[in-house]
Image (spheres, grey):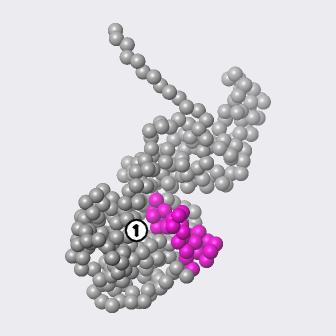
Amino acid sequence: MQLTDTTKRVFFEPTSHSYVLDGETLLMGVTSLMKKHGLSPDYSGIPEATLRKAAEEGTAIHKEIQDYENGISVLASDLISDYKKLGLKFIASEYQVTDYETVASAIDGVYEGSTKKKVKLVDFKTTQKYHRRPLEWQLGIYKYLFERLNPGYEVESCHCLWIDKKARKIKDFIPVEPVTKAEVESLLEAEKKGLIYMDENEKPVCFGLAIPSLNRALQGTRGHLTPLTLIRLLGCLRKPDVLDLCLVGVDPEYLNRGVSGALSLAIMRMLKENASLKWADTNLNLEDNYAIQNQWRRFRREECKRYRAYVKELSV
């Protein structure tokens, strides 16, 4: 089977895990696209070191299977033994797909289907929890891009190869029902327009409240609202240089699904579109709130104040 080779135009840079089209245009990976639109599992509450270690372990397991399929000698293991029992007929590993406009990514495994013109797409997962909906999106996007690149070929089924990375054994080989072509096209259209993809009911799933900082206008007024103070307040409202981030709310149904990434994008766009804005004040964040701390790592940041609370119980 001869598949379209996208590597002639799209280069993958492994250090930054980015895709570059024709040497100049940066394309988004499928995982990043899903995270931005709140469609992926949210790991923002997990320390970065833990995530990095898990990613390295997952990469090693992927490589072991890929080496086996590519004819490279590997040590006998339960993982390879379990994999052989699946009876999959290998076509390609890390097959790169793209729309040459917005997104690019690599499919873990492409396998023969029931006929010469049909294939199976398989994604390898080493996570502790099986995330059904994100996989439906991930494999749905892969299916859409694969069939677009290879007209005449049909993706007849999608699967998740769920692996226990500690035991190095296969937990399950799970059929996945991918999202529809229309859903994928709606997501890509939202990305092109700079919008955040909504759910099927177009119901808002999160909100953020930010206001221009009025601190400088009120400095030295001692609480008196004079004409001069009003002028300074109007100046802060029209051309603010500091933004106060006040409140964030997320629909409980959408917690832990990457919504924080979408909010970060909205903040960055707001800062970019308002030339006078130089800073955003996050106000108080708990230092052990890993979700919010990981979110602010996307920005150039400065810790300008720290508070400590001490408690002593008094016996009466």
Residue extending farthest left: 85
Instruction: Tell me the residue at 45%/22% (across/down).
Output: 310
Residue 13, above or below 116: above
Give the SS element for disc 1.
helix
Residue 184 relative to residue 11: left or right? left
**What percent of the width, then of the height, locates residue 44?**
44, 50
- Disc 1 crowd rating (10 Å Cα; few below 14, some 14-19, many 20+) is many
**Residue in the picture at 75% in, 26% down:** 226
Picture layout, residue 255 above or below residue 114: above
**Displayed quadrant of residue 139:** bottom left
According to the picture, the residue beneath numbered tag 1 turns out to be: 138
Residue 179 appears in the rendering: no
List x then y, in percent, for residue 53.
Answer: 40, 55
Q: How many marks do you count on the picture? A: 1
Judge by depth and name the residue closer to the eye, 56 or 302: 56
> Which residue sits at x=62%, y=52%?
270
Q: Is residue 20 magenta?
A: yes
Residue 263, percent across and down? 52, 52
Tell me the quarter of the picture where residue 182 sits.
bottom left
The residue segment tinted magenta is 9-35
Question: Is 168 displayed left or right of 92 in the figure?
Answer: left
Amino acid type for the residue under numbered disc 1: Gln
From the viewer's side, name the closer residue of 172 and 143.
172
Q: Is residue 144 magenta?
A: no
| Furthest residue in direction right, as rendered | 228
The quadrant the N terminus occupies is bottom left
* Residue 18 percent across, percent down from the top left: 54, 67
Indicate the quadrant containing the C terminus: top left, top right, bottom left or bottom right: top left
Residue drawn at x 42%, y 21% is: 311
Q: Is residue 48 above or below residue 247?
A: below
**284 on left or right of 232:** left
